[in-house]
Amino acid sequence: MIPVIMAGGSGTRLWPLSRTTFPKQFLPLCGERSLLQETVARLDGLTDQELLIICNEEHRFLVAEQMRQLDKKAHIILEPVGRNTAPAIALGAMHALRSAPDQKSPVLLILAADHVIQDIDAFHESVSKLHPFVEGGKFGTLGIVPAEPATGYGYIKAGTQVDSGVLAVDAFVEKPDSQTAQAYIESQAYFWNSGMFMVRADRYLEELQRFCPDIYTACQRAMEHPQKDFDFIRVDSEAFQDSPDDSIDYAIMEPLTALKSETPDIVMAPLDAGWSDVGSWSALWDIADKDEQSNAVSGAGRTILKQTHNSFIHNSERLVATLGVDNLVIVDTVDALLVADKDSVQDVKTVVNALKKQGGQEHYRHREVYRPWGKYDSIDSGERYQVKRITVKPGATLSVQMHHHRAEHWVVVSGTAKVTNGEKTYLVTENESTFIPVGQVHALENPGKIELEMIEVQSGAYLGEDDIVRLKDRYGRT
């Protein structure tokens, strides 16, 4: 059984923590590890097969670094553009079939990277119950035992019992209104659609070709000559962009249930394991530890709560104090602050849309930006200058590059920098500095065993990130 983890998506409803370049699946929202890392960790003891992770091109180094931190090997398929889950799973199925020994079709366990499951043993048990049915050619899914008549989830209508703990699936239904959701709960025949599936790779492609031949053909062309690049698998971008945008639910699950065959093609194992898709700040409040006033607090900064109830407070570094408030979500980061009624957090995406229209960058990236060599934090900027705090991992190297519009002054705070400055290469150590003129070809390397931390002061008429002309890069960036 090969785990296929879907790690795309932007998580706009968890802004300002989740942003386009660093979305929620890479954030440690429920502990010290990110949601992606928690997803990987809960597979321990379930399967020993190497992971298959499907992510956006832009997030490839985040995935690789987080897998390195877990000491896990993974094949990482890069989507040139987002096309929803049906085409993404097709890429995974095609890759798995090519890699399978003796041409035996493997079972795929398809998971989202951004879910929370508190009872791992229950998760393992439900997956194990489905496995023999899936090996025999069925489609399997995990249906969440509903805790309330939620209107934010699709539902699965269960049919007859086919084995102990396994039910036939009669239908996949859309997100209901509150009255319909209440009727679903009372019937005890409906479960939340978790978006977690199990299927043999060949069966998935067979049904995809049957119901969505355009998706199948586009993905087949995209995977004709995949390019291996470090841990990454690159597909044909032009071919993949021709694929329609569709989810596995619409592309395969709903058409299969509509056939109404006597023998069910889809079976479901109920899952009651403290599941959440962490789709909003209120959902995160639901699963968080709370104080006696039902407040949940997270983040590295200090908090002082007075006459505060039923609220969620996250502060990244500053002191946050509240007085006489109730039912609020307060999320404070170094460059953005969100204050919202907890009942309105589903509409956070409207704030993100407004930011996009304004032309701001707060929806797109954090002030602290991660790169394959380390990270930088834009700590100050003004007319014709910008100041960054740069951290370079041991052994890492920035690209050989030059700038048309800016000069740079580097001051080493700790560690040792190996600097290429035109024709010269030299070391710069703690409390020393160097200057890179406009147009000078240069490079930076950390040759030491500890992190290199330095302050970079940029000055010039234009200071945008697109004024980087890369001449050589070990990470394959253009």
Image (cartoon, rainbow, N blue to C red):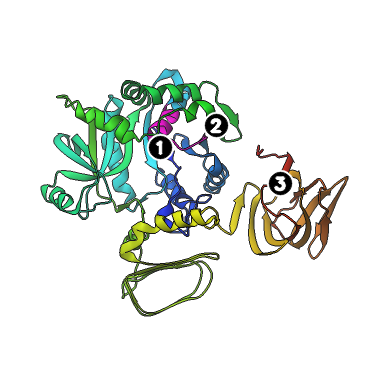
- Give the magenta range: 77-93
- In the image, which disc is placed on residue 84? 1
Amino acid type at mark 1: Asn
In whole angstroms, how far apart are the C-alphas of marks 2 and 3? Answer: 26 Å
Mark 1 or 3, nearer chain start: 1
- In the image, which disc is placed on residue 468? 3
- The residue that appears at 38% across and 40% down in the rendered structure is 111
The percent coordinates of residue 466 (x first, y second) are 67, 47
Is residue 393 shown left or right of residue 205? right
Residue 312 is covered by the magenta coloring: no
Q: Nearer the viewer, residue 385 or 17?
A: 385
The percent coordinates of residue 47 (x first, y second) are 40, 37
Amino acid type at mark 2: Ile
Q: Which residue bears the numbered disc 2?
A: 233
Number of other residues with Cα within 10 Å of mark 1, as a class: few under 14, some 14 to 19, many 20 or more: some
Is residue 379 shown left or right of residue 125? right
Against 157, residue 375 (above or below) is: below
Q: Quadrant of the N terminus?
A: top left
Q: Secondary structure at mark 1?
A: loop
Number of other residues with Cα within 10 Å of mark 3, as a class: few under 14, some 14 to 19, many 20 or more: some
